[in-house]
Every structure is written in structure tokens, then in C-alpha cells.
Image (cartoon, helix red, strand yellow):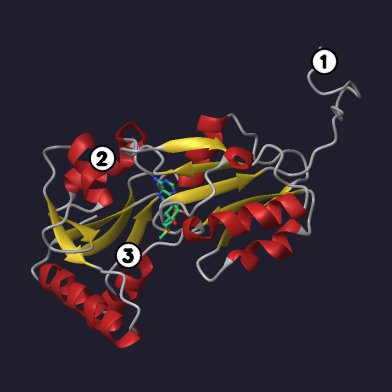
Amino acid sequence: MMGPALVGIGVGPGDPSLITVKALSELRGADRVFGPTMAVDAVGRAESIVRQAAPDVVVERLVFAIIEDAVARRAAHDQAADRVAECLATGERVAFVTLGDPNVYSTFHHLADRVLERRPGTPVTTVPGICAFQDLAARSGTVLVDGVERLHLVSAVAGPQAIDVPLADPEAAVVVYKGGRHLPALVERLRAAGRLDGAVVGELIGLPGERVGSLALAASGPAAYLSSLVVPPRREARDESTGAEAGEP
Ligand SMILES: C[S@@+](CC[C@H](N)C(=O)[O-])C[C@H]1O[C@@H](n2cnc3c(N)ncnc32)[C@H](O)[C@@H]1O
């Protein structure tokens, strides 16, 4: 596509080999690549993945510190949008990298909204990335959903009660994001609901210090912000297609 455009690129959860071919091609085709960071002198997670997967690509940092004050947060987003709009004004194709997928709990659409206020009509697209919960399911050998089972993805940033409604559905898998600080309370709720069986936690998946394991054996304290839980549906011990006990030939 010719002319200025903004593209949000998912770079996966951490393992640089999980970045897609399309993401790499978009990164190399962009005139400028931005990445979110907590401070201008700190390499953000997404930038670090790009550095490993495509060392030839230069990432310019945009500061998106986690600020409680909504006014200050808005000011930081505005500053980032000003910088992106400045580059678009010179005709650049601008990429913004984000952890996982750009359409799943990502900063990208907040940034895109602010950019569109400044430059209405700018083409905005996204390149999907592998989400942390997909990598966690793969690493732990968990079948997320099958047949008519359902999948809930919830954010526990406001507290562990976020899982109560999805847990009421026994045929649903529940994926919990942003619940690291509430890990002990989440484990207690899952135990009370009889859903600890097969539940797994992944902390810093694909990143230095990674921990992946059974939730029943998880440490008793809070985990990192970059932690995800996968709770599989409650499954009968029978294979519905053959009527045999699961695990039997
Ligand atoms: C702001 S959301 C970003 C989600 C991301 N866009 C995605 O598609 O996975 C942050 C949450 O994603 C999850 N997450 C992202 N990367 C992770 C990783 N490497 N390990 C564990 N959890 C991760 C955590 O639950 C974290 O609290």
C-alpha cells in the first residue's frame, strides 16, 4: 500500500521464533517502527522480541508508563500520538509493535484512536500475533476447547471476582489475563469451584525467568503482571466419539 498508513503488528508473547512471516515482512517494509516502553531508556518487551527476530529493524520508543492518573495517562498517549502523526505527515508507513496480538488487550487501538483524531482517514490495519494463552496451551499440552465447549478470556486486573461468571459454565475454558497479583485468590476460587484439575499458569512465557506449571502447585504468592492462566473445561472421563474411557485405545 502506498502513502502514509499505521499498522499494529503483533510480535507474539516472548519467544522470537513465534513472530509471523507477515509480521517480519511488515516490519521490514515500514519506514518507521515504534514500540511501547515504560521509560525512554528502557527496552520494551515487544522491542526486545523484534531485536532478536529481526536485528536489522530499528525500534523507536514511545513511553506508555502505567499511570494511575487518567489525565496524566491521556497526556502520555497524546504525546505518543503527536509523534506518530508527525511521521505520518511526512508520508511514512508507520508500524507499532505490540506483545501478543494487537487486537487483544493492547495499547494499539488507544494509540490509533488518538492518531485518527489528528489525521482522520489514515489507513489503520493490524497484523495478528500469537497470544500468550495460545503459547501456554501449547507448552502445557492443554486442549483449550473441543466440540461445543466455549472459551472465555477475562481480565482480572480489577480483582479475582472476574472469573466467577465464566466459572459458572462448566463446559467453558477460562483464560485469565492480568491476574498475576491476584494469583492466590484466583487459586482459591478455582479450588472452591472444583476447577483446579488441569489448570495451568504461565509466567513470563517465552521470556527470561519463564515459569509454566500446574496451578495447583503454583507458588503461594503473587506472580508477575505477565502471567496467564488457562483453566480447561470440566471434562467427563469418557471419550464422546468412541464411548471409551479417555486414554483408552
Ligand atoms: C496488556 S495484556 C497484552 C495481551 C497481548 N496483546 C496478547 O495478545 O496476549 C497483558 C497480559 O497479557 C498476558 N501476557 C502477555 N504476554 C505474556 C507472557 N509472555 N507471559 C505470560 N502472560 C503474558 C498477561 O496476562 C498480561 O497480564
Residue type at the position of mark 3: Val
Q: Is residue 153 visible?
A: no
Q: Position of residue 74 (x, y in %)?
A: 29, 82
Q: Image quarter for residue 238?
A: top right
Rendered residue at 32%/41% (across/down): 22
Tell me: 117 left or right of 237: left
Give the CA separation, mark 3 to mark 1: 50 Å
Q: Which mark is residue 124?
A: 3
- Assess disc 1: are there few (<14), some (14-19) or many (≥20) residues with their C-alpha within 10 Å of its C-alpha: few
Nearest to viewer (mark 1 / mark 2):
1
| x, y percent for residue 175 | 59, 51
- Nearer the camera: disc 2 or disc 3: 2
**SS at mark 1?**
loop
Q: Residues within 10 Å of mark 2 (few under 14, many from 20)?
A: some
Badge 3: residue crowd in 10 Å (few <14, some 14–19, many ≥20): some
Instruction: Assign a secondary structure to mark 3.
Output: strand
Q: Which mark is residue 24?
A: 2
Q: Which sits earlier in the primary sequence, circle 3 or circle 1? A: 3
Q: Amino acid at mark 1?
A: Glu
Spatial CA span between label 1 and label 2: 43 Å
Decide if ligand 1 comes within 8 Å of the CB at mark 1: no
Which residue is tagged 1? 248
Classify 87 as above or below 100.
Answer: below
**Which label's residue is closer to the chain start, 1 or 2?**
2
Task: Tell me the residue at 17%/73% (across/down).
Answer: 85
Give percent across and percent down for residue 225: 41, 56
- Quadrant in the rendering for residue 78: bottom left
